[in-house]
Image (cartoon, rainbow, N blue to C red):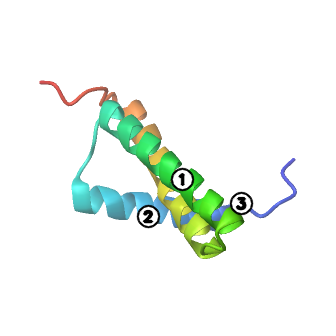
């Protein structure tokens, strides 16, 4: 049993994922995996800057939100069988 509140963050991430789809359209698993790698790097960089350079901690949360939204999109693409951008 999960004892932490998860519904509010999940709702935020799903809404952001839907907004991403509205803006960029449905994307393939391949494309989303590349975007995920980029966002994970940005999250790691934001964390290191917040920890070591008195960076903005809100940026860490923002980068996490971007990454989590991509996880929703990735799941949707997998479920839809959208594996590649190739015809």
Say which of 21 and 48 sits in front.
Answer: 48
Which percent across, then down, holds residue 64?
A: 57, 58
Query: Cα distance, mark 3 to mark 2?
Result: 16 Å
**Which residue corresponds to the image point at 33% horizontal and 27% vertical from the top-left?**
81
Which percent across, then down, holds residue 68?
A: 54, 53
Is 71 located above or below residue 42 in the figure?
above
Residue carrying label 1: 68
Are discs 1 and 3 less than 8 Å apart at CB? no
For label 3, count other residues whose C-alpha is less than 10 Å away and answer few (under 14), some (14-19) or many (20+): few
Query: Cα distance, mark 1 to mark 3?
Result: 13 Å
- Element carrying mark 2: helix
Residue carrying label 3: 6
For label 1, count other residues whose C-alpha is less than 10 Å away and answer few (under 14), some (14-19) or many (20+): many
Which percent across, then down, holds residue 38?
A: 42, 46
Residue 3: which disc? none
Say which of 22 and 53 sits in front.
Answer: 53
- The tally of labels here is 3
**Which residue corresponds to the image point at 23% horizontal and 52% vertical from the top-left?**
25
Q: In this view, which residue lies farthest toward the front?
A: 53
Are discs 1 and 2 less than 8 Å apart at CB? yes
Residue carrying label 2: 16
Which percent across, then down, holds residue 82?
A: 30, 31
**Which residue corresponds to the image point at 45% horizontal and 40% vertical from the top-left?**
37
Q: Which of the 4 image quarters holds residue 65?
A: bottom right
Q: Is residue 18 left or right of residue 14?
A: left
Q: Quadrant of the C terminus?
A: top left
**Which residue corresponds to the image point at 45% horizontal and 65% vertical from the top-left?**
15
- Element carrying mark 3: loop
Is 26 located above or below residue 9 in the figure?
above
Which of marks 2 and 1 precedes in the sequence?
2
Query: Cα distance, mark 1 to mark 2?
Result: 9 Å
């Amino acid at each position: 049993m999960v004892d932490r509140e998860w519904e509010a963050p999940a709702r935020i991430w799903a809404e952001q994922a839907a907004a991403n789809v509205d803006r960029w359209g449905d994307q393939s698993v391949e494309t989303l995996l590349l975007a995920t790698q980029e966002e994970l790097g940005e999250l790691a960089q934001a964390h290191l800057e917040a920890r070591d350079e008195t960076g903005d901690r809100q940026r860490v949360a923002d980068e996490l939100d971007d990454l989590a939204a991509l996880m929703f999109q990735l799941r949707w693409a997998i479920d839809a069988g959208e594996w590649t951008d190739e015809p």
